[in-house]
Image (tube, rainbow, N blue to C red):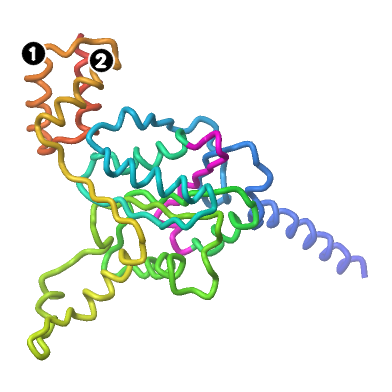
């Protein structure tokens, strides 16, 4: 039956093409030379030129730096370490501090895998792939937050704790968020709380929201800079671009931050770029 043979041949060709489009679970093992990866629809993609952050440039974050670097060192040494949640004001160095881990521990074989929020539901598959590789990985979830009707947070909860599949020893999760509990909190949540025998019992909605952030063993809070702290970061950023920190630059940097309604390291770096463009 020549027609049937032709059909089978076409099906074989079609399957070959589909297999090329769908990445296997061991995609990372084909690119062992990278230290930084990004998860995409095609699997784990190596990042050749990743953003190197020098921890010495992160001013006014001594406590956060010490705690997170110590946690990462314990993780690399095979000692107990916690998944970490870095939360707080925007632009205060949360993401930069995680990136600094890669620069600080690069010689110890540390790898970082950036996972977009849209891929949170795939965390089990991603972590299974990393566990098979054997190297030490930080799973980096940046600017993480969930809306009230978004169920993808349940996959993250299960990966952190509560699943029959344990978190492998070579994977740790570091996440950043502007929200302390990663999910929106409403007045109705508080109104639904009850008093029993003189004790406040939070509503089920509050318990559900808090239970996600509670599964991170290490919490690091980041707060807006004072004006003096902001100016110190501005001076560092300006000098790193080969300019002097003049009185005019100081005055303009304060105006620059006031216009944006925030004093942070991000605003300081943005001002330095703006100031350099005027010279």
Span shown in magenta: 105-121
The crowd level at tag 1 (other Cα within 10 Å; few <14, some 14-19, many 20+) is few
The crowd level at tag 2 (other Cα within 10 Å; few <14, some 14-19, many 20+) is few
**Observer-nearest residue: 82 or 44?**
82
Quarter of the C terminus within the rendering: top left
State which tag comes first along the sequence, 2 or 1: 2
Residue occupying image coordinates x 47% and y 55%: 172
Q: Is 233 drawn above or below residue 221 in the view shown?
A: above
Q: Which mark is residue 239?
A: 2
Name the spot of residue 140 as percent of width and height, x first.
43, 49
Per the image, the residue denoted by label 1 is 247
Q: Is 175 drawn above or below residue 11 in the view shown?
A: above
Residue occupying image coordinates x 27% and y 64%: 147
Question: How many marks on residues?
Answer: 2
Quarter of the image holding residue 200?
bottom left
Name the spot of residue 127 as percent of width and height, x first.
54, 59
Task: Report whether 9 appears left or right of 240.
Answer: right
């Amino acid at each position: 039956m020549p027609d049937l043979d032709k059909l089978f041949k076409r099906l074989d060709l079609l399957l070959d093409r589909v297999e090329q489009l769908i990445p296997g679970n061991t995609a990372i093992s084909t690119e062992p030379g990278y230290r930084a990866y990004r998860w995409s629809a095609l699997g784990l993609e190596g990042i050749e030129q990743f953003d190197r952050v020098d921890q010495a440039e992160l001013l006014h974050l001594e406590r956060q730096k010490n705690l997170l670097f110590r946690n990462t060192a314990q993780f690399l040494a095979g000692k107990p370490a916690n998944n970490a949640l870095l939360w707080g004001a925007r632009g205060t160095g949360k993401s930069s501090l995680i990136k600094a881990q890669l620069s600080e521990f690069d010689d110890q074989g540390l790898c970082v895998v950036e996972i977009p929020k849209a891929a949170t539901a795939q965390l089990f598959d991603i972590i299974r792939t990393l566990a098979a590789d054997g190297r030490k990985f930080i799973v980096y979830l940046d600017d993480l937050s969930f809306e009230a009707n978004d169920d993808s947070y349940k996959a993250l909860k299960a990966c952190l704790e509560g699943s029959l599949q344990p978190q492998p020893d070579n994977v740790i999760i570091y996440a950043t968020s502007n929200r302390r509990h990663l999910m929106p909190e409403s007045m109705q949540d508080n109104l639904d709380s009850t008093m029993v025998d003189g004790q406040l019992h939070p509503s089920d909605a509050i318990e559900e929201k808090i239970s996600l952030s509670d599964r991170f063993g290490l919490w690091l809070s980041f707060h807006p800079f004072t004006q003096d702290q902001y100016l110190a970061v501005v001076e560092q950023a300006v000098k790193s671009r080969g300019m002097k920190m003049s009185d005019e630059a100081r005055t303009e940097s304060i105006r620059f931050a006031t216009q944006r309604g925030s004093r942070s390291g991000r605003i300081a770096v943005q001002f330095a770029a703006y100031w350099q463009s005027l010279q």
